[in-house]
Image (tube, helix red, strand yellow):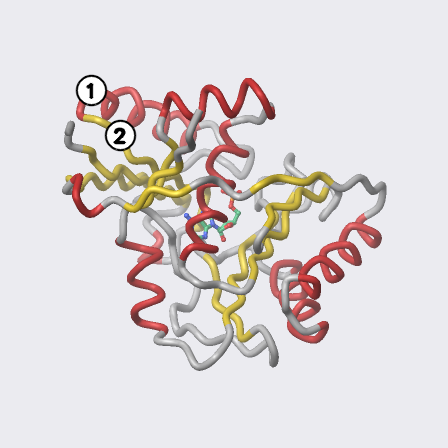
Amino acid sequence: MEALYSIRMRAAKGGSHEIGGRHISGGERLVTEEGLQQYAQQLIDRALHHSRGEADFINITIDRVPPNTIHYIYPLSVESLTCETVMDARQYAVNWLMKEGVSELAARKGINFITHDTTTRGAIIMDASSGERLDDKGIRGVRVSHLDWEEDYWNKWQRREGGSSRVRESIALATKVHLAGSVAELCWSDDPEYITGYVAGNTYCRIPHLKLRGDESGGRVFYVRQPIDLEQYIHFLEQVPVMIRGDE
Ligand code: AMP
């Protein structure tokens, strides 16, 4: 079996994240050696031409993934809601989160967190009942990596369902977050031009208008049920390789 490499990028403006630079963008894939160069180039382009600004710090990390450590899994199934206003969209998000097992209080706390988040570059972990933040990662958050779609399967899936590279990355991430044992996830992008977000649990539910165009807020909340071994949960999200594939 061909070796795979995890490649991930984080970019900031005003210096590195560590010295207080503002997060611009990130990305992660699992690719063959052949694909490394092409994807590194794509990540650099993403960092230099982002609607949040032009990065002046770009960090790219590559490490080899032993093939026998990879988990294979089907993608979550996708639903799309239609709504016209931010208020409706956020109410739908609350309802959907509750359907997945999140309390109304925690759902609203998640929305409130993302509404005011312009700095966190990963996700926060929240108690699905109380809405208390459980991780201590500050503005770094928890960054899910070591995940991707098998290329052939993605091409088939995309022909059937449609979807951009953004959808590709989000469904892979939400599927891994679900596999990790999360109750649900809430996300909208910090890209001011991209206003469709999602709630994921057993299903990945796309919700348009989760924010207004031009708004730079965005982020991710992973809801978990206590008791949970947080260290192990975070290790799985950050380190264990997961590949999306199906039967077709
Ligand atoms: P994006 O969908 O790339 O615009 O990301 C939206 C927000 O989700 C970002 O501002 C981060 O807070 C968070 N995020 C992005 N990528 C990841 C990741 N790989 N793992 C965890 N959180 C992420």
Residue 117 at what x, y percent from top left? Answer: 58, 59
Residue 117 numbered mark, or none: none
| Residue at screen point 58% across, 73% down | 128
What x and y, as percent, mark residue 225?
Answer: 51, 74
Report which quarter residue 207 is drawn in.
Answer: top right
Residues packed near mark 1 inside 10 Å, few (<14), some (14 to 19) or many (20 plus): few
Q: Bin the neighbour count of mark 2 within 10 Å (Cα to Cα): few under 14, some 14-19, many 20 and up.
A: many
Q: Confirm or deny contact between disc 1 and disc 2 (CB under 8 A).
A: yes
Question: What's the CA distance linking mark 1 and mark 2?
Answer: 8 Å
Residue beneath disc 1: 34
**What is the secondary structure assignment of the residue under circle 1?**
helix
Q: Which amino acid does label 2 sit on?
A: Val
- In the image, 191: left or right of 43? right
Identity of the residue drawn at 83% across and 54% down: 87
Q: Position of residue 193 (x, y in %)?
A: 65, 34
> For the view shown, which residue lies furthest in the front direction?
247
Please identify the quadrant where the N terminus is shown: top left
**In the rendered view, does 3 fall on the left or right side of 246?**
left
Q: Which residue is drawn at 85% across and 41% down?
A: 84
Depicted 74 relative to depicted 103: above or below: above
Beta carbon of the mark 2 residue lies under 8 A of ligand 1: no
Q: Which residue is drawn at 28% across and 41% down?
A: 59
Q: Closest to the observer: 194 or 18?
A: 194
Q: Quadrant of the C terminus?
A: top left
- Please state which of residues 235 and 219 is positioned toward the viewer in this rendering: 235
Among the 4 quarters of the image, the one containing residue 2: top left
Secondary-structure class at tag 2: strand
Q: Quadrant of residue 191?
A: top right
Q: Residue type at mark 1: give it.
A: Glu
Observer-nearest of 128 and 87: 128
Query: Which residue has dot 2 on it?
Result: 31
